[in-house]
Amino acid sequence: MGWGNAVKGCDHGRSRLTYNHMVVGEGSEDRVFHALADATRRDILARVFGAGMSVSALARLYPMSFAAVQKHVAVLEQAGLVTKERRGREQIVHGVPDTLRGTVDGLMNAYEQIWRQRAGRIARILEEQS
């Protein structure tokens, strides 16, 4: 799903994925925003953007099980926001800022087009009235 479709309305004919009983479309933008919707995942992302961290080191930072942290990392990985690198027995999580940047840029460009079109229509209306 491109941003042009996102701002025009829902596409009810698309297939869907389910994460924790929440329906999320298959578009990469949907996966990114779903991943960012959770405070723990945003915190994990902020930590691994600076430097890679092992999943076990991340798990020690949160009042939840190792498996729960692994699931959060998996959601971030499915969204393309992080990658995992195996080092011996550990998995090191690294942030992928280009995914976030691309998603934000796409959204901003789509809304900029909408507002430019609206401003153009307003300008034409004002010209007609004068």
Image (cartoon, rainbow, N blue to C red):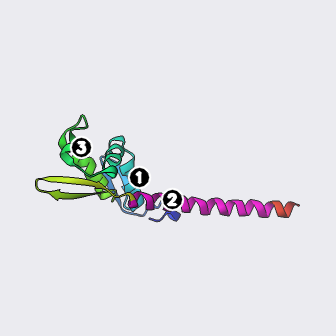
Residue 122 falls inside the magenta stretch: yes
Give the labeled residue for mark 3: 58
* Mark sitting earlier along the chain (3/1): 1
Q: Disc 1 on helix, strand or loop? A: helix
Using the image, tell me which numbered label, if any, was put on residue 71: none
Image depth: mark 3 or mark 2 in front: 3
Give the labeled residue for mark 2: 107
Amino acid at the residue labelled 3: Leu
> Circle 1: is it few (<14), some (14-19), or many (20+) Cα within 10 Å?
some
Q: State left or right for residue 2 relative to residue 46.
A: right
Q: Nearer the viewer, residue 75 or 5?
A: 75
Residue 16 in percent (x, y) is at: 35, 59
Amino acid at the residue labelled 2: Leu
Task: Report the predominant secondary structure element of the magenta stretch.
Answer: helix
Residue 118 in percent (x, y) is at: 68, 60
* Mark sitting earlier along the chain (2/1): 1
How many numbered tags mark residues here? 3
103, above or below 20, in the image = below
Using the image, tell me which numbered label, if any, was put on residue 33: 1
Spatial CA distance of label 3 from label 1 is 21 Å
- Quadrant position of the N terminus in the picture: bottom left
Residue 45 in percent (x, y) is at: 34, 49
Q: Disc 2 on helix, strand or loop? A: helix
Amino acid at the residue labelled 1: Phe
Residue at (67, 63) in percent of width and height: 117
2, above or below 73, in the image = below
Residue 6 in percent (x, y) is at: 50, 60
